[in-house]
Amino acid sequence: MSKKKNSIWMFFASVKLALFVLFILATASIIGTIVPQDAPPQEYHQFYGSVLEGVGLYSAKAVSIVTKISTILSIDDMYRSWWFNSLLGLLSLNLIICSIERLPDVWRLVVMDNHQTKIGRLSSMRHKLILTSTDSIDQTTSKLQQLLASMGWATSKSEKEGGSLLFSQKTPWTRLGVYAVHLSILVIFAGAAVGFFYGHKGGLNLPETLSSKVIYQYGSGEELDLGFTIKCNWFHMTRYPNGAPKEYQSELVIIEDGKEILTEVIEVNHPLTYKGWTFYQSSFESHKKYIITVTNRDNDIPERFLVPLRQAVRWQNEELLFAVKDLVPTDTPMVYNFRLLVSDGKGGQHNLILEANTPKTLTRADGTEYVFQVKEFFSTGLQVAKDPGVILVYIGCGLMLAGLGVAFFMSHRRLWVYIHEQDGTTTILVAGTANKNKPGFERNFADISAKLINSQSFEVQK
Amino acid sequence: MNSALLLNYSTFGYLFASFIYVAAFLFKSNKAALGGTFFTAITVIGQTAALGLRWYESYQIGIGHAPLTNMYESLVVFSWTIAGFYLYLEFKFKNRTIGAFALPFAFAAMVFAESGWLNISQEINPLIPALQSNWLIAHVMTCFVGYAAFAVACGIGVMYIIKDSSANKDEGLMGTFPPLRVLDEINHKTMVFGFIWLTAGIITGAIWANSAWGTYWSWDPKETWSLITWFFYAAILHARFTRGWQGTVVAWLAIGGFFNVLFTYYGVNFLLSGLHSYGS
């Protein structure tokens, strides 16, 4: 009990500290939403310049001083700063100590032997009912046990002060709900810490048809080894009739030990996960070049060519010479078809209009058929994350919702029935309490009372 | 019949219902207040049909998505959840005077949606890839049920303060309000309800963000402000449970909390930039 006297301990256990830390965190967060975060230095000069101008204190020196203070206090990268995260740490410490401080008392209430409750306390409870019976104490007791059990209140019995005491309770564990909520916050923080220390976030710009074994960490740009190879077969972008982007898609292949393990099309909101690494469709880049795929129908072996606009390319073996002459607008803004000029080596000149990714067949004078297909050459922009802490965060979130539900909507309800002899009559004292939702329990208790009275086995004491 | 017309009618439906509730309160007529309930219910049904119709219309123009994707649609949903939540509250606590302080919020949301004051587009826009997710409905609906509860709590806070500061608390006009103790209780329960839905809204948002970007929390202004709002209501609940705060101070906090909600909902989109910019 000595720790209870310790004022430092009590300080860390206090709700005041929690509210104070929450207040500071909230204030800091507000500043963080106003001051640009993680921006280039010149932006801060501009930002603080306009702020100081707004309050009429503008001078070049003032701007540089404020900018410097902002840098020292990491206000420009606040959510990652030591002091912001220390505050989160302090909040965790507060939650832990406050729970250690209060939990034993609450636990005692959860597991306590309610047969030890003093009879005097029962008669002073707000919800009570006094009945009498003409039967003996034993008969009355078993009758009551039966009746209560049929109402869903299975009772246990003890002998007490010459009478018998019945007790029944519902959901005593719900007293722990609020601690489950506190615990859930700690679990979420733990998940965030796991992510911080063991997680990786990076990006990768992968040109179509190429592959990579590494990604590049955000911030540092450091190479991170995936442990397998990721390849992009193709990137597609579709648009709505008004030209707005509808979907970005990439077909990714996972290659391990030279074997293709997995091929999957990802899009925004539908990432691909493999061995803890998740690949998110995030952006794309056009290289202003075009992939022309030509297939000779005799052998069906496709050959690919990468060419800039208006630059001819020759397929030596087949004596073909071709170029993307220009882009032809379609009904959809920003969507183009391709005009392909083909010189077939047998004197034929062809002018084909091709939709992206839609093959078209050309027949040469000698009867050979070629299938042409054109698409713009893209790199897919992937965001890549490995965060082993996410599962903890999700568990914490689930626990929080469950805990809130229990803490706010469920209560520990207790019911005592004391049967004893008073002035030669068997007298029954029914009493009950609930730690929460008192109006709800009032209805509960009224219902029990009505059922007992209506059972015709007892008289209501005048 | 199209959704735009039906939504126009909804605006007038809420105006009319607010008017009846206020008049019934001023003339102390419980019977007239029943008319308020009737018109609110009819309008909620009509607005539900309008939202369904707008959803259907979006499919007809080839960009089908739930009507939850821009400021206009969110204001409509806001008024819808306020009215729906209010009806639930009225059913639960059997008091119609709250309607005079809750329904005007539903009407105001529709006015902002329809009037053009906010300069927002009423068109059905195609859904950008980032919003194409099953989490859209879960995230937006949980948030707005929470916001609606906080709006109603604000109205109840106003009632509490009016009643508390009037000389004759239990007679005349003030006699038709629920007793202060009951108002305080309803206010508390409404905030608890809103708090749980806000929690669910933040969580669904985090899960969605993680499935879209691989980051469940990025201190984007909308996220940060929703967390600040969460802190605010968490603080009110803690002050009540551990310090016994209630009554007037909590009524004022309910009003303050709603300003916090409004900034999270509207202010962030227009004053700060971030991931939720498509909400404007």
Image (tube, coloured by chain):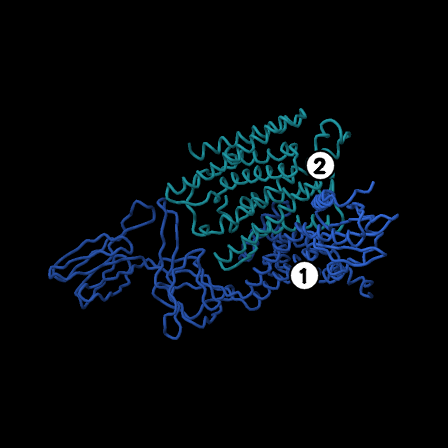
Image mark for residue B160: 2
Q: Looking at the picture, how far across and down is residue A290, in whole percent? A: 29, 59
Q: Chain of mark 1?
A: A
Q: Please give the residue where the numbered disc 1 appears in the rendered image.
A: A92
* Residue A48 appears in the figure: no
Front-most of residues A351 and B27: B27
Given the image, on which type of amino acid does mark 2 rest? Tyr
Query: Among all residues in the image, which is located at the extreme bottom?
Result: A257
Q: Are marks 1 and 2 in contact (CB under 8 Å)?
A: no
Disc 1 and disc 2 on one polypeptide chain: no
Q: Looking at the picture, how far across and down is residue A264, in whole percent? A: 38, 62
Front-most of residues A37 and B180: B180
Category of crowding for the residue at label 1, using alpha-carbon neighbours closer than 10 angstroms: few (below 14), some (14–19), many (at least 20): many
Q: Chain of mark 2?
A: B
The image quadrant of residue A79 is: bottom right
* Residue A234 appears in the figure: yes
Chain blue in the figure, letter: A
Front-most of residues A116 and B67: A116
Front-most of residues A48 and A359: A359
- Give the residue drawn at x 49%, y 31%: B8
User: On the rendered structure, is B133 left or right of B192?
Assistant: left
Query: Among all residues in the image, which is located at the extreme right?
Result: A423
- Give the residue drawn at x 59%, y 43%: B147
Category of crowding for the residue at label 2, using alpha-carbon neighbours closer than 10 angstroms: few (below 14), some (14–19), many (at least 20): many
How much space separates mark 1 and mark 2, taking CA atoms?
36 Å
- Give the residue drawn at x 62%, y 44%: B260
Chain cyan in the figure, letter: B
Q: Is A458 drawn above or below residue A261 in the view shown?
A: above
Q: Quarter holding the N terminus of chain B?
A: top left
Given the image, on which type of amino acid does mark 1 rest? Ser
For marks 1 and 2, give the one nearer the viewer: 2
Q: Looking at the picture, how far across and down is residue B165, in whole percent? A: 75, 33
